[in-house]
Amino acid sequence: MKQNEIPSMPNMELTKKQELRKKSLLHKQVKQISINEHSDFTTLIEAFANSSFEARNLGKAAELYHKHIQTDTAIIWSLSGSIFSAGLRQITIDAIRNNLVDALVCTGALFEQDMLEALGHKHYICDTKIDDGELQELYIDRVYDHLLDEIALRQVDITFKRIAESIQPKLYSSREFMRLSGKWLSEAKGVQDSVMQAAFEKNIPIFIPAINDCSIGIGLAIQNNKKENMSIDSIKDLKEIAFLKSECGDSGIIIVGGGVPKNYSQDSVVMAEMLGYNVDKHKFGIQISTADQRDGGLSGSTLREAISWGKNDKNMEDIMIWGEASVFFPLLVGYIFNKMKNEKRKGRNLSTVFDSK
């Protein structure tokens, strides 16, 4: 089988002095956390459930996740923010490969971060008081306390362009394009493991409702200059997540952050009902967020509030963790990984529900 070729890095001119300075800034890597590499801490998390404040919420959330993952409930993760570049990318890969999640609804930026590391690049630790003007001149991008190479990011754009050019020119849902991207990476030479590839191999659908707002959208826009090209059909996307909800039965949602993915995963229930499907509302939910509910914004709104909108079951079991995801999410997923280590949950293979459509 012919292997897919990774495009080369774009050529951006820097002086020798700039190159040396850039190298000095991009040297201390953000280490990806793997749940396979850390000893069991389940008893600590279980002890949290009988303590107070956010420790109690974490402990109760871990109990709730464990209760439902032992059933046939479909586990849907809604992910936003820069959590992959911050070190939670490998945790997501580990969770996929160990059947701890059945579907992903995410922001597109997560998959430019995923692709960047799949191509062999890294994210780098920095001081938050760094000179951003200098970073711009050096083609370095900053996400609060870590950096990435803008030239490498442009290679990501071109890689998504190459994937788009390799497939039949027609309309695709975001789920279809992400599945094809995972397949392309599985057949590419010299790439690292990725969330996209793991999801493809484990039949886990990925939905990106705002796919234009990232490197994927840039890559698709570049290839869109041709006479015949592929494009994303957002209405097809909506119909597909509604169909998925109708097929998966009981479901629960794990929400990290908020934004579009949070609403899309919850609103799949209303979408399905409006399209004529008879569906159950989400049975359980866990949200990790630092957003305040008092400004009326979506990211801070509670899972209980969504009951009034008909998205979540009125008897929903829910836990809100008011905290930062880079701390709480690894603890939650690590707990489930260790609890399920000997039970070997069978994956739902939800991507296969679309095979007969």
Image (spheres, grey):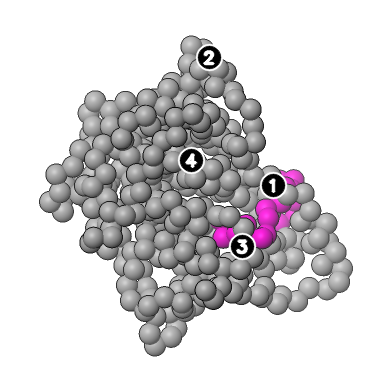
Is any part of residue 330 visible from this angle?
A: yes
46 vs 240: above or below? above
Helix, strand or loop under label 1: loop
Q: Residue at x 28, y 58 (%)?
A: 354
| Amino acid type, label 4 | Asn
Q: Quadrant of residue 114?
A: bottom right
Sequence-wise first label, 4 or 1: 1
As drawn, 95 above or below 304: below
Residue at the spot of label 2? 47
First in residue order: circle 4 vs circle 2 = 2
Q: Name the residue that disc number 1 marks.
A: 30
284 or 26, nearer to the observer: 284
**Residue 98: assigned label:** 4
Across and down, in percent, residue 135 comes to: 73, 60
Q: Quadrant of residue 131?
A: bottom right
Q: Which mark is residue 191?
A: 3
- Disc 2/disc 1 C-alpha distance (Å): 30 Å
Q: Is residue 40 left or right of residue 183?
A: right
Among numbered discs 4 and 3, the one appearing first in the sequence: 4
Q: Position of residue 81 (x, y in %)?
A: 51, 47
Q: Which of marks 3 and 1 precedes in the sequence?
A: 1
- Find the magenta span and give its range: 114-133
